[in-house]
Image (cartoon, rainbow, N blue to C red):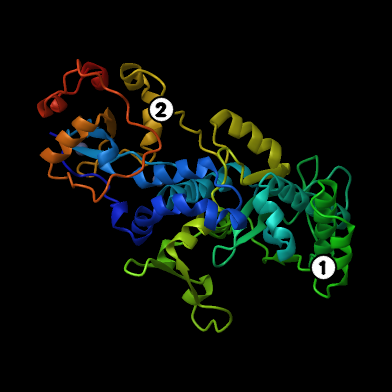
């Protein structure tokens, strides 16, 4: 019998989960009336992401059995949703992997800088209603940097390298599209040399970036000349360039932290408090965790539905690339990503349209669902472990969890992204004892 030792995350006990679970249904019912004007149409993909999140890491929705080859130790591992931004656990796993990958596979041992490029409030909503513009934002950032660096560094056929992450959230989850950029602090030459750039003139960079953005919005018909005339009159343009200090090649930890920072989740669970009785969410500002930060608002109270609406506006569309690679870093990463399928996007799991039997043969798909499984090291003997079965049938899940004393009756049924696979009556539900066997293809032999 599998021992109930698995990595117990218990997502249902978090205030975040409880808030979503309590209010998600109402949220969808009132969206059109209350939020459509401000946030645009409700995207069907967002519905899917939230449903998946509510199922993520919960044994009741299916799990894998993992067994140690050496000592036979077993545990159950719940399926995870792998969705970005909305699921804190899956997003965090992606953040860690991205940091490692970027440092080892993409960036070269040369100095880098962190740059943040942002745009005025008046222009932000265009990006909310038309998310395709976000790739244009990224492109403008790159073009501005390339133009600037090629001007200040001497040489023919030179190019910087950049990794640009699009973030859409501000301090209190407002929609604030901006770019977090990891840029080579200079240019690469064709012969493999690298020239470090002189001190960067952020004002000049800001001017170029501003020009690129306005030109793009004008070309796409989002703004007209009047808007530009208006912006010209402002003393502060509302465009901003922040430039961090130089990160040297041997400062590997700083680099990895920066990589993680640029794709961080849109919110932090630590900064939220859910007041269940009043249906409100209190969200503390980033600055509130820092000592002696006197400036700005410390926290904001949201109605739970408002909170969910704000959260949803930061969920990228299916397959939407939020990180892009340019210049010297583009070819390298493109090649590697193609080979390893490790683009910003982890491959989307196609929903099953197969019979239950075929479904159970689809081992690869299931492996993806237990995203958290690596490294498979036995907590008892440090031996290597492997997945011996995937349990997806509701009756079987219930049977096993009951046996282990892990079956908890849910408060209410959760909305599902799709119905569980249909199991015809003719297939006998195996007894719990069947699970102690270790057949070659365990899932097939059960049915
Ligand atoms: Zn998840
Ligand atoms: Zn072991």
Residue 158 % position (x, y) = 83, 45
Q: Which mark is residue 377?
A: none
Q: How many marks?
A: 2
Label 2 crowd (10 A; few <14 / some 14-19 / many >=20) = some
Residue 417 % position (x, y) = 40, 37
Left or right of residue 365, residue 204 in this image:
right
Residue 10 % position (x, y) = 28, 52
Secondary structure beneath dot 1 equals helix
Q: Is mark 2 within 8 Å of ligand 1?
A: no
Toward the viewer: 182 or 192? Answer: 182
Q: Up-down: is 438 above or below 176?
A: above
Q: Residue at x 63, y 51 (%)?
A: 165
Residue 201 % position (x, y) = 81, 66
Left or right of residue 43, residue 186 in this image:
right
Toward the viewer: 257 or 85? Answer: 85
* Residue 433 makes an appearance in the image: yes
Label 1 crowd (10 A; few <14 / some 14-19 / many >=20) = few
Left or right of residue 336, residue 389 in this image:
left
Where on the image, by quarter, is ligand 1?
top left
Q: Which mark is residue 365?
A: 2
Q: CA distance from mark 2 to mark 1?
A: 50 Å
Q: Up-down: is 291 above or below 112?
A: below
Q: Which residue is mark 1?
A: 203
Q: Is mark 1 within 8 Å of ligand 1?
A: no
């Amino acid at each position: 019998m599998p021992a109930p030792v698995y990595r117990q995350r218990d997502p249902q006990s978090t205030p975040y989960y409880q808030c979503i679970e309590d209010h998600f249904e109402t949220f969808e019912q009132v969206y059109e009336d209350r939020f459509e004007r401000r946030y645009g149409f409700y995207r069907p993909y967002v519905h899917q992401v939230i449903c998946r999140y509510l199922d993520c890491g919960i044994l009741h929705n299916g799990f894998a059995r993992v067994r140690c080859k050496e000592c036979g130790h077993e545990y159950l591992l719940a399926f995870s949703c792998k969705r970005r931004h909305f699921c804190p656990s899956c997003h965090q796993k992606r953040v860690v992997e991205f940091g490692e990958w970027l440092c080892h596979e993409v960036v070269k041992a040369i100095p880098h800088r962190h740059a943040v490029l942002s745009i005025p409030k008046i222009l932000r909503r265009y990006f909310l209603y038309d998310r395709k513009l976000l790739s244009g934002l990224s492109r403008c950032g790159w073009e501005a940097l390339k133009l600037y660096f090629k001007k200040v560094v001497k040489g023919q056929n030179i190019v910087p390298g950049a990794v640009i992450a699009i973030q859409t959230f501000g301090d209190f989850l407002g929609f604030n599209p901006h770019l977090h950029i990891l840029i080579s602090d200079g240019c690469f030459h064709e012969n493999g040399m690298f020239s470090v750039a002189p001190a960067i003139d952020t004002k000049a960079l800001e001017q170029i970036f501003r020009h690129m953005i306005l030109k793009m919005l004008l070309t796409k018909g989002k703004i007209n000349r009047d808007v530009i005339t208006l912006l010209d009159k402002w003393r502060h343009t509302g465009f901003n360039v922040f430039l961090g200090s130089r990160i040297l090649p041997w400062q590997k930890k700083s680099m990895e932290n920066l990589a993680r920072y640029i794709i961080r989740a849109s919110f932090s669970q630590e900064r939220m408090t859910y007041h269940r009785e009043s249906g409100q969410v209190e969200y503390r500002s980033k600055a509130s965790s820092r000592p002696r930060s006197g400036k700005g608002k410390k926290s904001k109270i949201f109605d739970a539905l408002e909170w969910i609406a704000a959260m949803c506006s930061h969920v990228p569309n299916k397959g939407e690339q939020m990180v892009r690679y340019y210049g010297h870093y583009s070819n390298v990463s493109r090649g590697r990503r193609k080979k390893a399928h490790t683009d910003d996007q982890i491959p989307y799991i196609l929903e099953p349209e197969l019979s239950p039997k075929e479904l159970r043969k689809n081992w690869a798909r299931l492996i993806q669902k237990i995203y958290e499984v690596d490294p498979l090291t036995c907590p008892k003997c440090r031996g290597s472990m492997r997945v011996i079965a995937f349990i997806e049938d509701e009756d079987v899940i219930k049977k096993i969890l009951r046996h282990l004393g892990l079956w908890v009756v849910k408060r209410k049924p959760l909305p599902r992204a799709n119905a569980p696979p249909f199991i015809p009556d003719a297939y006998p539900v195996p007894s719990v004892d069947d699970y102690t066997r270790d057949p070659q293809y365990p899932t097939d032999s059960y049915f």
